[in-house]
Image (cartoon, grey):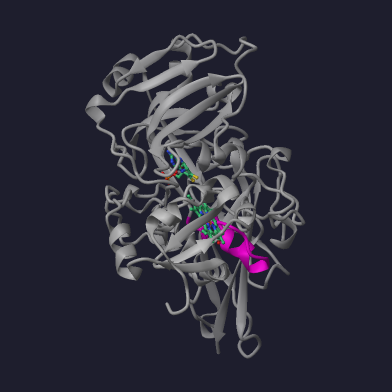
Amino acid sequence: EKGRPIYTREEVAKHKTPKDRVWVTYKEGVYDITEFIEMHPGGAAKIMLAAGGSVEPFWGLYQQHKKPEVFAILEPYRIGTLEGGAAAAAAASAALKDPYAGDPARHPVLIPRTQKPFNGETPGSLLAASPVTPTDVFFVRNHLPVPAVDTEHYRLQVTGEGARSLELSLSELQSRFRKHHVTATIQCSGNRRNEMSQVKPVKGLEWDQGAIGTAVWGGVRLRDVLKAAGLSEDDPAVRHIHFEGLDKDPATGDVYGASIPLSRALSPECDVLLAYEMNGAPLNVDHGAPLRVVVPGVTGARSVKWLGRIVASPSESSSHWQQRDYKAFCPSVDWDSVDWGSAPAIQEPPVTSAICEPAPGTVLSAADGEVTLRGYAWSGGGRGIVRVDVSSDGGKTWSAARLLPPPPGAPAQGSYTGAWAWTLWEATLPLPAAGSDSSVTLVVKAVDSSYNNQPDSVAGIWNLRGVVNNAWHRVTLPLEQ
Ligand code: HEM
Ligand code: MTE
């Protein structure tokens, strides 16, 4: 570009600290981002990884940068042009290996929310179609590239405070411990986040109601493995069990991690599983092969996939995803005022429900006189669903939906404990008389075995990260006369 100073890569590389000013390149542009570092939504430490070099490999990892708003933030910091221009920059960038190149193929029916890392949700019609979600269409929530794990050489490590360290191959795990099956729903904390962003922007994947699914998981009890490592409830030095994934952030080397309280990990009633099977087949790559944790009744983030290490500890996991992510705050808290230490990590999520059919965009016909709704309801902590209420007039009048039989292996609806799986439901409701309205708002809300209800609107539970949205689920559809 005319009039801008030209800099070589070597010159840019000298600007790596605030003292020398922090420069980065993007395509052929050279930018002095010193003043932006403290304002970076992804944190100062992350942006500093690009200091003195190109941001492109990092933006390849964190693709939320690939949008005009981010380019608009960067442009005012432009100070010059890279020697050799766009062609040299492109060649340097292409030489970097794509860390997602080893990711598996995905079923085309999954609705992708991001490709790298892959995040895809199940269409509503498929959720409502079967009490157990087929593995190929089960939602995928990945934060990092899928790790290459060779089952043959895989070893699970168990270690930490009060534990006799163990190293177990998959076949040792299978032969030493009894096999258990648990039918459990996994739901992401961000499920239905898209309704929150309609109130006010939130940060996160724009999930509709499909970041949820139910499977029959097969594996060994975490409790049995912890007992074999000598852990007991009576050890006051151990309060939490950490799970570390084998998936690594290529920029920082951090692995995915989370933790649950020891009491849940050891409880015979909580059914926490180290699963090597999903729906009767060996776990597939996207869902955590060869071994993952399944923490029934707890938010999906704690069910760590590609499990590498279990660590007993006096404190919670220090991982980003335990400390500075899956937490909810008062609606007035924003990214400048958030104090992550002030809220506990989400474990048991609140009661929720969603309409899966009819799908958004369906045109209803007044001549039909009625509409059939299908969907799911679920609550955390093993609380069963006792009732699902539906409305076809925006919530003015209600009827009870018919609860469908539980999936194989799950207890009856309304159980006080151990109801790890969702309840599917159906209802047929009247449509307004011909000639009245031009649209219809269908609504669902559920009640769990603790008589918890769902809040009627999203606004009051809005939070900056867009998690645990369990407001009444509404679908507004045009009504043809
Ligand atoms: C998020 C700007 C460099 C890692 C963001 C967001 C903006 C931004 C505007 C919020 C996007 C959204 O959520 O919609 C920039 C600019 C950069 C830069 C202008 C360069 C000058 C980097 C680098 C890294 C990085 C080099 C990593 C090594 C992240 C992460 C988030 C983020 C992890 C997500 C935070 C979250 O959602 O919790 N960045 N960024 N950024 N950035 Fe950057
Ligand atoms: N485990 C690892 N190692 N890496 C991850 O990115 N994502 C978590 C959890 N376990 C994740 C993980 C989140 S947020 C959810 S909701 C579930 O996995 C999703 O499980 P699924 O992809 O099998 O549906």
Q: Is residue 190 visible?
A: no
Q: Nearer the viewer, residue 326 or 54?
A: 54
Q: Position of residue 22 (x, y in %)?
A: 54, 53
Q: Nearer the viewer, residue 56 or 422?
A: 56
Q: Residue at x 61, y 86 (%)?
A: 438
Q: Position of residue 418 (x, y in %)?
A: 55, 32
Vertical placement of residue 379 versus 85, above or below? above
Q: Nearer the viewer, residue 376 or 283?
A: 283
Vertical placement of residue 32 versus 414, above or below? below
Horizontal placement of 211 versus 417: left or right? left
Q: Is residue 73 visible?
A: yes
Task: Point out the image quarter for the C terminus.
Answer: bottom right
Q: Position of residue 393 (x, y in %)?
A: 67, 73
Vertical placement of residue 137 versus 280, above or below? below
**In the image as oriented, which residue stretches furthest toward the left?**
152
Q: Quadrant of ligand 2?
A: top left
Q: Residue at x 55, y 45 (%)?
A: 45
Q: Residue at x 52, y 12 (%)?
A: 231
Residue range (magenta): 190-210
Q: Residue at x 60, y 36 (%)?
A: 381
